[in-house]
Amino acid sequence: MADSNASRWIRFLRQYGPAAQNDSMYDEQIRKVSKRLNVSQLFFTHPIEKQLLGLFEPTASVPTSVILTGTAGDGKSNLCGKVWHQLGGDAAEWDSPEIYFQITASIGGRQILVHMVRDLTGLPPTDDRGRYASKDELLQRLSSILFSSEPNEIFVLAANDGQLIETWRRLPPSEHVLQARAVFDKLLDENRDKVEGLALGFFHLSRLPSLTLLDLALNAFLAHPGWQACYAEADEAGFFGPRCPVRHNYELLLQPLVQKRLRSLMRLCDHSDLHIPIRRLLLLLTNAVLGHPDVKDWLLKPGDVAKVINDGTVAKASLFSNIFGGNLSDSRRDSLEVFDYLNRFRIGYETSNRVDNILIFGDADDNLKPYFDELMAADTFYGADASYYAAQRSYVEGGEDGDRAAEGFLALLVSQRRGLFFKIPAQLEDELKLWELTVFKYAGEYLTKVVDVLHGGGKVERPILARLVKGLNRVFVGMLVDVDRDLLLATSLSFSGPSVGQLLEDRIPVAARKDERIELTLLLGRPAIRVQLSEALAATLRLNLTRFEFLSRVAEGALPGSFSRECYEDFLAFKSQVLASLATRRAHEKSEDAGLSFKLLSVDQVGNVTDDVIEVVP
């Protein structure tokens, strides 16, 4: 099948994989290989595509310049290409290595000159065709056009967000350059896509949820006709036959449960402020299906499959390990942010006694055997195969080769725990404590009982809010207090800033009292904890996954400063914000007793808090 449809599809698919590539030439390389092999690219409609192309319709009301920004791999160059083709640009010209393009088109009822820069970083200092004198002059021209009331020319500029601002900082200063830089800063800081009165569309592609992009990429990947060619040309003893790991990985990726767990990880990345661009998502999917550590570029080719089957190394191609880059070298895996982010969950290295008992003793224990049979024995590809049983037996029985056997079996356990994360059915999630297979054991609760509830317009369960308040109190007071019905606002008796607060400034009830309350709400679409002190005064802090886990762990007994120093500092800063709002409220209140008494906190051995009123005698 050297030049079959299936072979060409797999050769093309490998272009999306983790082998080192020149990122600046990525889009061009994909297009070239697609044409050479006569295989269609992995196409899908970008979430902003319709809105973007609408700005370049002949019926568009106002000619509008566009800035496409974000991280590398967000699809900026591809979207520029869509605009170019809609304007009637020449396909062969776009396929050239040029960075700067010009085209005249009818927009808003007028003939408009469109300047297109598909990569700001790669824009040459001068143009050998004489279309602009210098890079600085061209960007100064863009700056002026943004503030023109009826421009006869517009720009489409693609630039990574950091490079965009840095480039404008280095431009020779002028009125319009300074104005443009201020606009870009404002739009980036405030997560906006336009400024009223300015003919500019500003699209920050890194603000798009990774989950949205995964769904689009996954659908395009799974529905590509290349897979049907693989089925049609399957080799019974090799590629896409019944024992082919590529086929099995593809079919695993079709399973709703596997997709659900992968989508959960993407949602958690989004709620941890970790953005994964389109390019890396396509890399992830390609690596998941084709990955194997013992072949060239870590990706299987059709000709590799028969050897992998004959050598008995099919298990090394496990989708469950490939999703975390387990097939890659350490250096290559660490260089790719998608695997860096997914490995922060430490799936494979976190576990529970119950799960490990199933993996190690399940086939011999009557109580655990039903779980072992369902989750391990039934998986003849990546579960309990002959090599697993042999390593398990050697580990349990010990012997002369005990240490080496133990090391080998423990490495197998990492892969099997990863598999269980994707195989444990929904009805067993709570019983087997699925999320204890990650470092964020409250992650499932965070998604279903916080994120989903808030987005559905509901209120988070009282026990969850109480636990978070208890965690906050332990941070704010600096002691293992057991209070979850009020938020204790305590300061120290000195001004040196120690972490232990003994002077009680106020108690804010969890249950609403007048205009005071503590609640979980949404802030720019993300969960946040809000302390309301009056109708006009409140303090709010984004409650991302890490902060939620931190407060929950502190509430159950972890030391506040040991789990995450960064989170600890975040909550101390939040405490200062709440205290500042309290001071503002008090400045507007009048009380005859103000300054004549104060309250000292005391905590007993089980965490109960009492506050003693100390009267100050004039």
Image (cartoon, rainbow, N blue to C red):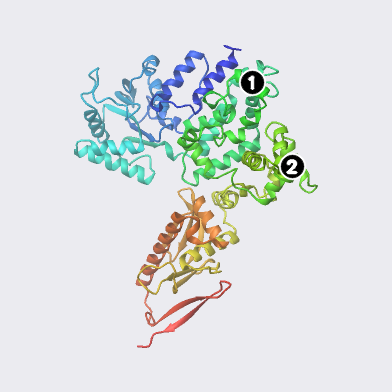
- Residue picked out by circle 2: 372
Q: Could you say which quadrant of the image residue 87 lies in?
A: top left
The residue beneath circle 1 is: 307
Side of 616 relative to 442 (left or right): left
User: Is residue 536 shown to the viewer in this render?
Assistant: no
Q: Position of residue 124 (x, y in %)?
A: 27, 24
- Disc 2 and disc 1: Cα gap in Å? 30 Å
Q: Earlier in the sequence, mark 2 or mark 1?
A: 1
Q: Name the amino acid type tagged 1.
A: Lys
**Mark 1 residue element:** helix
> Is 492 situated left or right of 433 in this image?
left
Q: At label 2, which amino acid type do we have?
A: Phe
- The residue most toward the bottom is 618
Quarter of the rendering containing residue 565: bottom left
Quarter of the image where the C terminus is located: bottom left
Q: Are marks 2 and 1 in contact (CB under 8 Å)?
A: no
Of circles 2 and 1, the one toward us is 1
Mark 1 Cα within 10 Å, few/some/many (few <14, many 20+)?
few
Q: How many marks?
A: 2
159 in relation to 413, above or below: above
Residue lying at the far front of the rendered structure: 400
Residue 578 visible within the image: yes
Residue 214 in percent (x, y) is at 53, 35
Q: What residue appears at the point 44 percent right and 54 percent down from the top-left corner?
A: 566
Q: Residue at x 71, y 48 (%)?
A: 357
Q: Which residue is drawn at the image coordinates 46% and 40% (left, top)?
A: 275
